[in-house]
Image (cartoon, coloured by chain):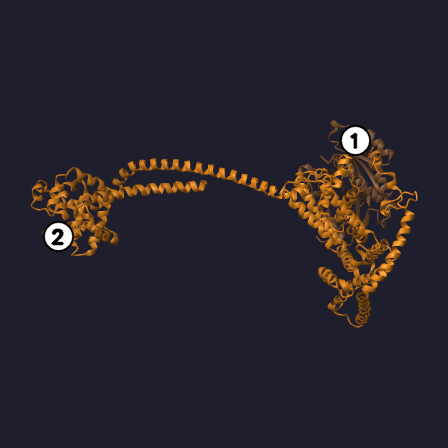
Chain colours: A brown, B orange
Amino acid sequence: MSGGPYSYSYIFKYIIIGDMGVGKSCLLHQFTEKKFMADCPHTIGVEFGTRIIEVSGQKIKLQIWDTAGQERFRAVTRSYYRGAAGALMVYDITRRSTYNHLSSWLTDTRNLTNPSTVIFLIGNKCDLDGQRDVTYEEAKQFAEENGLMFVEASAKTGERVEEAFLETAKKIFQSIQDGRLDLNAAESGVQHKPSQTGRTTLSNDQQPNKDTCSC
Amino acid sequence: MYTLKKASLRIDESYLKCKNGCDYYGNEEWGGYCSKCHWERKKEARLEVVERGALKEKQQQSPLGFAKFEEKKRYQSDKKAKLLKVFAKSPNSKDRGKPESLFGPETGEAEAVHAEYQELFSKVGAKVETDIHKCIRSFYKKLLSDAENPLTSIDELSERAQNFYQILTARLDEENCYRGLSSEEKEQLIDYAEKYAMTCLYRILFCPATTTDEDKDLYIQKRIRQLNWVSAKHLDCGIDETSTEVHDLVYSSITELLGMDSTKAPQDKLGCVMRCCRKILHLMQKCVGGPTSADDFLPALIFVVLKANPARLKSNINYVTRFCNASKLMSGEGGYYFTNLCCAVSFIENLTYESLNMPEDEFNQYMSGKIIPSGTWESALIMCEGMHLINENLTIFGDLRKRHAAIMMEIEALKDEMIKFQDEMLERVSDLRENVPLELRPIREPMDIDAEDPAIADLPPPLSPQIVEERVQQPRPRSPRQDSPEWQIPSYPDEALVTVNYDIDLSDLSGGEASQADDQPMHHSLDTGSVASLDLFRTSPPPLPPSNLSLLDSNQISPSLPSPIKPLQSSSSPYQGFSSQGWQIPSIPCDTGTSCFEERSQKHLHEQGQQQLQHQPVQQNNVPAQDQENSLGVKILGNTLEALDSLL
């Protein structure tokens, strides 16, 4: 459908950051495909994912950039942050070291994004509660201290993955409406696409289909 | 934790200081100078460039002057066209032809860009096309004049280009003539404007003399050459350097990356990066054996960049960064991959022994070329190419050998099966041989007998002189057939047939058809029941043959043989005497012989010559029986083979 890619009025750019192996790609894949990555080995490359969601009746296209988490790339991966409207900071609840690195990730994010960038903390692998190494309370406190939104999720089961992405989008949309986020700023990470009359009706039909078909 | 590590990056203090030695800290972006010194230097450089540029301009005056003249001319004709438009809408084609020739040396390429978007313009209409060309033209002129001023920095030009994109985007949303276009078409129009303008301005905007792009290109090129020893292992990326398939994929991604330098429009360069990265993703999927994440992707991209050493890498990256529509660069797949490429390049620029997790002195030795690690990509490529091929071929041969062995085993199995099958078949055939002849005889004989039954009723009278026969034999030697029937007929009607045959031959005089028809029953008897009759011949008349032989060779044979034509000649006269009997009998075969077998009778004529051998008939009799058995066997064999085939 020719109107397909334009059936949204905003584009938000997200980045997913966090140590290697915390499940960044899996979270992204779970969100865009609604599948756990290991279950569909045929998937080629998931670093770049998009999905159209709806917030307050507005269609928003989320563009999510996965990043390399290796320490040695930290210094050079800064250009990822440029123009990100949302940053999902991920750690692994079963590996304390990934939690300990959060403060440096947060520093990077704060330094390299604009003040209106929404930062969301995700404790991944909450399905492995038996191997938990970081308590919920501890992380919750860290999030509150730094003014972050926080949730424990599981890319494997899909638990609360949607919530993390959607809440971030809601917060960004809120700041757009409040006027805190300047749409015209090049690095806002948000692009406004005035949707066209006649096309929105088309996209309205399209959206529910998209939701039902994905498993 | 991380911050601690970052701080531990061992960089000498003096390295960080301004090169001018003014005690301020320097910056790599400013060529190692502090901000103050950097700007001073830049000013100087610009002045230098101005001088150089003036020289250059002198050299290039003629083409430039021509371009200006062209511009003027275009402008005038454009005016004219506008005037014309007021009165009558000028035809589409006329408008279209104009803008291409506007930009002197790049005319050909600009035309190609225009042709690429022909479809779009045919959709959006001439009005839109004219307007967008107007925008491009004004931007082109402005930028050209700006660029001619050597004091304009490349960043200012970049800003101007970005402004143009933004203004154009706004214009597309506001202007009347663009109303009704879909956002997709609008996006394409912006793309077109960008591509068209940048293709025309490429020579001015790419790696301009006012920047240090070229030096950076040379630096990174040298750096990558120095790092040629870095293997996939050093980067912790899962590229399997020994697999041919992986090699091919690495090559194709390298080719895509190298293609970046040969394109002119920023989005085309972006496209090259995108294709390269998609191939790397594919490659990583092959190596990792599953979906890849950014954790795997970035090292692989670094590896590919290191192995590709793309020409004018920095210039290309800077050009795209400056002049590609920023909104595109910051979002979208192309932007994502381009960001990754920037990261990879920046990693290579800042690569230290720490980033490769190796001891400092080892790293230094590698960098200075004192030692060369074994198993590098290049050595795998150049030195061991032959070995690689041999290895590849060996594995192929090994595979072939395995398959060959498997095939041989299958062949053996099939052979065994076939032998078994043959044995089985032989057994069955021999079984059939025992059974079938016994069964067949009663089946077919009755037919003959039944057919001839009425005739047999007539026969007894001629047969009655049984006792006489022995005596008669000698005086009447030419009719041994009659002799044998005299014993046999009561029990074996076959012999009766034989006699009948004989009689028919006599009747040839009356009708040829009859004789032909008679042959048939004859065959029946031969085919089916003759074995028994022959047995009788063997058992009961052994004393007779010698006498028969001695007395009459031909006549003796004829009884059992199908065609007694020969005897007919020899015994033509005596038969007339028996005609009374003969006439009675022929009527029988006439009833029975329903079909004509001319061929057979002819065959029998041919066989006459062979009939002189007494034992031949015996053989002949046996053969058909065997044939039948065989044919039955063959039939079964055929069926089973078919079954086998279907099974296979």
Q: Specify whether residue B108 is in view.
A: yes
Are the residues flagged by discs 2 and 1 in contact, CB closer than 8 Å? no
Residue ID at (74%, 32%): A125
User: For residue B90, which quarter of the picture?
Assistant: bottom right
What residue occupies the far front of the structure in this picture? B370
Q: Amino acid at mark 1?
A: Ser
Q: Which mark is residue A97?
A: 1
Residue ID at (83%, 64%): B58
Q: Which mark is residue B570?
A: 2
Q: Is residue A83 above or below residue A98?
A: below
Residue B490, position in %: x, y?
Answer: 16, 41
Q: Specify whether residue A9 is in view.
A: no
Q: Residues within 10 Å of mark 1 (few under 14, many from 20)?
A: some
Front residue of B213 and B115:
B213
What residue occupies the far top of the structure in this picture? A130
Q: Secondary structure at mark 1?
A: helix
Q: Which mark is residue A44?
A: none
Q: Amino acid at mark 2?
A: Ser
Q: Left of B625 or right of it: where is B303? A: right
Residue B226, position in %: x, y?
Answer: 75, 43
Q: Residues within 10 Å of mark 2 (few under 14, many from 20)?
A: few
Same chain for mark 2 and mark 1? The answer is no
Q: Secondary structure at mark 2?
A: helix
Name the image quarter holding the C terminus of chain A: top right
User: For residue B526, which quarter of the picture?
Assistant: top left
Residue B357, position in %: x, y?
Answer: 76, 35
Front residue of B99 and B153:
B153
Q: CA distance from mark 2 to mark 1?
A: 125 Å
